[in-house]
Image (spheres, rainbow, N blue to C red):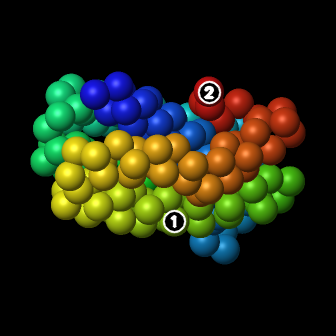
Amino acid sequence: MRNGAILLACLLVVVVMAGCGGGGGGGDEPLSKEDYEQQMQALQSDLSASANELQQAFSNPQDVEAMSAGLNDAADLLDDASSGFDDISPPEDVADAHQAIVDKSAAAAEKLREFADSVANASLADLQDRLAEFQDVEEFTELQTAVSEIEAKGYDIGGS
């Protein structure tokens, strides 16, 4: 099933984007650019290591149960990333983009859980339609936009 490979690619992009993003700190003094980059790169490294586990879940695209479990695992990673990003106090010049990544990571996690539920209950024909819908999830695009905004301001946050 070619769409299973597309789904895997989308999920890996999501994990990478989530790791690239930032979080809106909890009222602490904003970090320096260097400290911010260091913390963001550490989160990226953690998420990249977890991507291998997702790859295993999608090794057989006809195994709907594994696919659904992999989607839920990806949602958990995004929730963890959102929490980690939220613990970081970004420099003021990237605070809005950083908060967007906190928010969009959490929203994307919810979308993945909804998708996992629909995949678990879908027929093969329905599954192909759901995979096509998955490629247009707005939160993923918004995550990439926020990452690009941070990178455009000269930050190396370990992104793609």
Residue at x-position 35% and y-position 43%: 128
Q: Is residue 85 visible?
A: no
Earlier residue among tags 1 and 2: 1
Q: Looking at the picture, tell me which residue is in the foreground, 103 or 35.
A: 103
Image check: 115 left or right of 123? Answer: right
Quadrant location of the C terminus in the rendered image: top right
Q: Residue at x 28, y 46 (%)?
A: 125
Q: Position of residue 157 (x, y in %)?
A: 65, 35
Q: Residue furthest front?
A: 125
Please identify the quarter of the rendering in which residue 159 is found: top right
Residue nearer the viewer, 110 or 98: 110
Dot 1: element: helix
**Along the viewing direction, whichever of 125 and 16 lies nearer the viewer:** 125
Q: In front: mark 1 or mark 2?
A: 1
Q: In this image, 63 relative to 156: left or right?
A: left
Q: Which residue is mark 2?
A: 160
The residue that appears at 17% across and 44% down in the rendered structure is: 64
Q: Quadrant of the N terminus?
A: top left
The amino acid type found where label 2 is placed reads Ser
| Label 2 CA crowd tier, 10 Å (few <14, some 14–19, many 20+) | few
Tell me residue 35's x, y (percent). Answer: 66, 42
Q: Is residue 54 above or below residue 79?
A: above
Q: Which residue is mark 1?
A: 107
Percent coordinates x, y for residue 31 in the rendering: 71, 53
Query: Cα distance, mark 1 to mark 2?
Result: 21 Å
- Mark 1: amino acid: Ala
Crowdedness near tag 1: few (<14), some (14–19) or many (≥20) residues, C-alpha within 10 Å: some
Q: Position of residue 115 (x, y in %)?
A: 35, 58
User: Mark 2: which secondary structure?
Assistant: loop
Q: Is 37 on the left or on the right of 74, as rendered?
A: right
Observer-nearest of 103 and 108: 108
